[in-house]
Amino acid sequence: MNWFTQLFSKPEKEHLDPMKPQVHEHQKNKMKSVSNKFLIVGLGNIGAEYANTRHNIGFKVLDFLARKESLDWQTVKLGQLAEYKFKGRTFFLLKPNTYMNLSGKAVHYWMDKENIPLENVLVITDDLNLPFGTIRIKPKGSDGGHNGLKNINAVLNTQNYTRFRFGISDAFKKGQQVDYVLGQWSDEENEKLTERLDLSCDIIRSFGTAGLEHTMSGFNGK
């Protein structure tokens, strides 16, 4: 789907000592990274006119977590960032300011800057193919026509990062997809969002503490 674009502008093997803990390396520059740092990316578009739209659910999840945990947002290169510490893990919550179709630039930059391995990246995005509020966590996959994911795939040169898809349903008439996705939540949806946002916070914590497999089995389909 190109309508969003129209709207907005192998490392060498090394000998592993079994007595030493393994560390991860960034594919691009082989920088070593500790495993207790996580990059949680909420996809969305900047600007007040998009703040409460379905397409901005990634931003909304991170804003909800930040308010709940009294986190401060900092304006940083390519976005806004909040740091959340939980059970010995550090979660970097990132809201890119690049607009949706250039999200990969911010993801790549903050992975490099904070030395975060690909397996510790979680991208939160809306999904038209899921009923409202339905959760689906996947370790990899295609962009599914989503321009934010499409750009991340291109910049990182891989589809092998975890995505947290939040269902927004496809309850729109033919030819009204853009208006629907960039439209405000309905009153009925708003009534149910708080519980779904609470659940989303649990998913983020679980991803960093319990791991991907446990998180998928515990939350997918809820």
Image (tube, grey):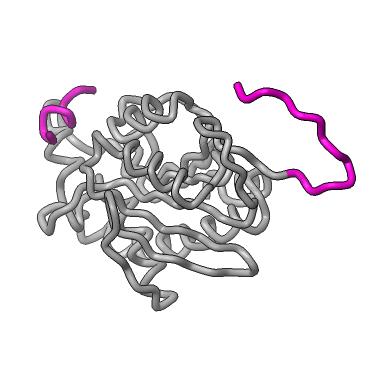
Q: Quadrant of residue 171?
A: top left
The front one of 95 and 54 is 95
Residue at 89% across / 46% down in the picture? Answer: 19
**In the drawing, does residue 202 fall left or right of residue 178?**
right
Q: Eyeballing the image, is 55 above or below 152?
A: below
- Is 25 included in the stretch rendered in magenta? no
Which residues, given as a range, are shown in magenta? 1-22
Majority secondary structure in the magenta region:
loop
Residue at 17% across / 33% down in the picture? Answer: 177
The front one of 222 and 72 is 72
Residue at 48% across / 25% down in the picture? Answer: 158
Q: Eyeballing the image, is 181 above or below 88?
A: above
- Is 11 included in the stretch rendered in magenta? yes
The front one of 109 and 194 is 109
Residue 212 spot, x, y in % from top left:
63, 45
Q: Eyeballing the image, is 145 above or below 55?
A: above
Q: How many marks?
A: 0
Q: Quadrant of residue 173?
A: top left
The front one of 200 and 186 is 200
Q: Quadrant of the N terminus?
A: top left
Residue 137 spot, x, y in % from top left:
52, 42
Residue at 70% across / 44% down in the picture? Answer: 23
**In the drawing, does residue 31 fall left or right of residue 109?**
right
Q: Eyeballing the image, is 13 above or below 57?
A: above
**In the drawing, does residue 1 fall left or right of residue 200?**
left
Residue 88 spot, x, y in % from top left:
64, 67
Residue 198 spot, x, y in % from top left:
45, 65
Q: Residue furthest right?
A: 19
